[in-house]
Image: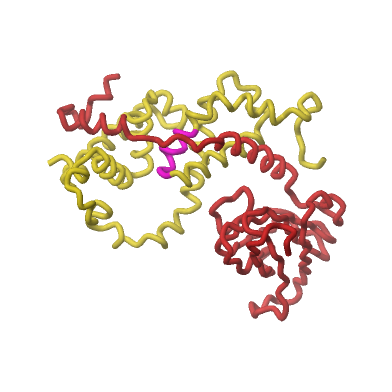
Amino acid sequence: MPGYTLGPMRQGDDSQIFERLLQPHLDRLYRLAWRLAGEKAAAEDLFQELLVKVFGKLDQLVAIEEPGPWLGRVMYNLFIDERRRFARQRLHMVGEGALAGDGLAGLPGPDDPVAERGLAERRERLGDALERLSDEHRVVVLLHDAEGYKLNEIQDLMGTPVGTLKSRLHRARARLRELLEADGTFS
Amino acid sequence: MQDEHAYDGRGDAKDREILALLKDLPVPPAAAGFYDRALGRAVLEGRRRQRRRWIYSGFGAAVAAGLAAWVAIGLLWTVPNPGAPDAHIPGVTIALEQPRTVNLVFSSATPLDDASLTVTLPDGVELAGFPGQRVITWETSLKAGRNLLPLTLIAVSPAGGELLARLEHDRRDRSFRLHVAVSEDPPGAS
């Protein structure tokens, strides 16, 4: 069949090999997709695209002793490629005016004042603040502070030196605090 | 880790609260069966991508495409593309959420290296493997004769519309339109 590159020893069972190699990493990859993409549909698309891409690199995957970091790096690169691809479209779709002011945080909240002050509200505001960070800052703070990745693991994933990551982490945290103080979450 | 508590060098109660919020920021679990479905789709789509390429000289290799619509495109470079509506736009009907392969056949009198093909999809119609993308571009080469490009379309809404395939080579281009209608009936019902 044209286009197939798998060797004769692997023909017929490539899907089982693929699933067996991927299975231990699926939860972590799904969480990573969610942290990168920020919402369910985009996270599922990113996760799916990763699996398709990795299936095409099965020979490479088989040869890797510890595939976790490699899989994360492939997903991160897919995420970055996708962001670049849609950068122009995003500019057309979201006018600057739509980003001014308080954004979603400025919209009327639920009638129940207790719920408004609850944990869900704080998470929502944190989510809004995270959205206002650059991709580089948001990804670092989410992977490090929310997911518990070590800086050297993030270095492997993003291909960015630890020193730069430390700086980004510091700035991202400072910006988060600034935004949350400004919107009254921490007054 | 030292940097976990170094918010802006202050590390006060607010910083700790932000850190706690971040640590508790939920990731909803994947839906039941999602991993299995995703793995299965990856295998199918991965295999399709491995096969996917221009298939030269005739239709033999595309027989396996099954439900396939054949759409021929003549490349007459000597005739400038006027951009005017075609007298006749060929059409294909696909069932909602059912993948269907449409084979675009490009006939070229001469080989074309370094050509670029851009497919623009109507709203609600996706190309398998490119979820959410309306415009997909490939770099490719054509041989003299008939060249086949199988596109697997999936309708995610019943709207349908026009698919535009634009082939560019050496500052010349040729556009081709295909009307994609979407049936909400199950496959085979129409």
Residue that appears at 53% across and 44% down: A45
Q: Nearer the viewer, residue B9 or B40?
A: B40
Q: Residue at x 57, y 41 (%)?
A: A49
Q: Which is the main secondary structure of the residues drawn in magenta?
A: helix
Image location of residue B12, percent across then percent down:
15, 28
Q: Quadrant where the C terminus of chain B lies? A: bottom right
Q: Residue B3: in sight, yes or no?
A: yes
Q: Would residue A53 appear left or right of B64 to someone viewing this image?
A: left
Residue plotted at (63% across, 55% down): B154
Which corner quadrant holds the N terminus of chain B?
top left
- Location of residue B5 in the rendering, given as x and y in whole percent from the top left corner: 23, 24
Please tell me whether residue A34 belongs to the stretch shown in magenta.
yes
Residue B48 against residue B84 in the figure, above or below? above
What residue range appears in magenta? Answer: A30-39
Q: Please tell me in which quadrant of the rendered image residue B180 appears.
A: bottom right
Can residue A182 be seen in this snapshot?
Answer: no
On whether residue A28 falls in the magenta region, the answer is: no
- Examine the rendered structure and indicate whether residue A164 appears above or below residue B142: above
| Colour of chain B in the rendered structure image | red
- Is B54 placed left or right of A118 in the picture? right
What is the quadrant of residue A20 in the picture?
top right
Query: In the visual, does A139 lie left or right of B83?
Result: left
Q: Quadrant of residue A92?
A: bottom left
Mark count: 0
Please give the letter of the chain rendered in yellow. Answer: A
